[in-house]
Amino acid sequence: MIKPFDEFPVPIEDGFSVAMLFGDALAEALFIRGLEGAVITGPTAPKDYPRIFSIGELLRVLEQLKDRTVFVRSYPLLRGSPDDLFSVLETAYERNLTIILTNTPLALNELNLLKEFERYFFKPEIFDYLMVLRTKLSRGKTRGELSVIRVPPQQIELLGEHSFQIKRKLKSLAEKGQ
């Protein structure tokens, strides 16, 4: 199971697929920093990770891995088609990879999150998890907020809105200088 940090309310099952939208850069940074041992890639990958710029390159990366977690930042920038998305997910399932495809849009339509997923991931119903993670500053406290729109049947009780403390996680990131 993947749980990027202790307070994160939804453990992600190994070998499953995730489409995730981030409401802000801080939410994305918190999530990425918690993915120990994951392969982080995509057109906007950090400098220590492989950057890819096409679906073909992503498929080549996936072919080289087995039983790992792959986090693809800014997936829509790869400009793939719905068929390409099916190929990516099929390869991930064959290789027993947990694949997390993400995007951090400039503006997020909070009133119709499912439409946002369709806009960036074509067919959101083919993913095991659909989630939106954002941070919120209120009365001097930063909190994480997670909208869980889809989960596997064994985690159905996790659907809905979750709010959780991230102060400890922010403090540990600040101490590491990240």
Image (cartoon, rainbow, N blue to C red):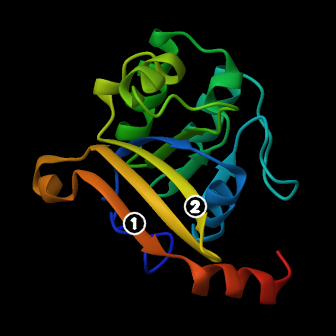
Residue at coordinates 55% horizontally, 38% vertically from top-left?
63
Q: Residues within 10 Å of mark 1 (few under 14, many from 20)?
A: some
Quarter of the picture holding the C terminus: bottom right
User: Vertical placement of 43 versus 82: above or below?
Assistant: below
Lateral position of residue 96 relative to residue 55, left or right: left
Is residue 59 visible in the rendered image? The answer is: yes
* Residue occupying image coordinates x 43% and y 77%: 7
Amino acid, disc 2: Lys
Which image quadrant is residue 8 in?
bottom left
**Residue 161's x, y, as percent?**
31, 54
The amino acid marked with disc number 1 is Ser
**Which of the 4 image quarters holds residue 89?**
top left
For the residues bearing labels 2 and 1, Cβ distance under 8 angstroms: yes
Q: Quadrant of the N terminus?
A: bottom left
Snapshot quadrant of residue 130: top left
Q: CA distance from mark 2 to mark 1?
A: 9 Å
Q: Residue at x 63, y 24 (%)?
A: 76
In the figure, 79 relative to 25: above or below? above
Task: Please name whichever residue, 69 or 150, is drawn nearer the observer in this view of the structure.
Answer: 150
Q: Is residue 73 above or below residue 176?
A: above
Q: Nearer the viewer, residue 145 or 72?
A: 145
Q: For the point 49% across and 58% down, which residue is it?
A: 68
Q: Secondary structure at mark 2?
A: strand
- Residue 136, numbered circle: 2
Relative vertical location of residue 47 with respect to residue 91 in this rendering, above or below: below
Give percent across and percent down for residue 101: 53, 39
Residue behind mark 1? 163
**Could you tell me residue 162's position as x and y percent?**
34, 61
Q: Earlier in the sequence, mark 2 or mark 1?
A: 2
Residue 12 visible in the shown view: no
Q: Position of residue 72 (x, y in %)?
A: 62, 42
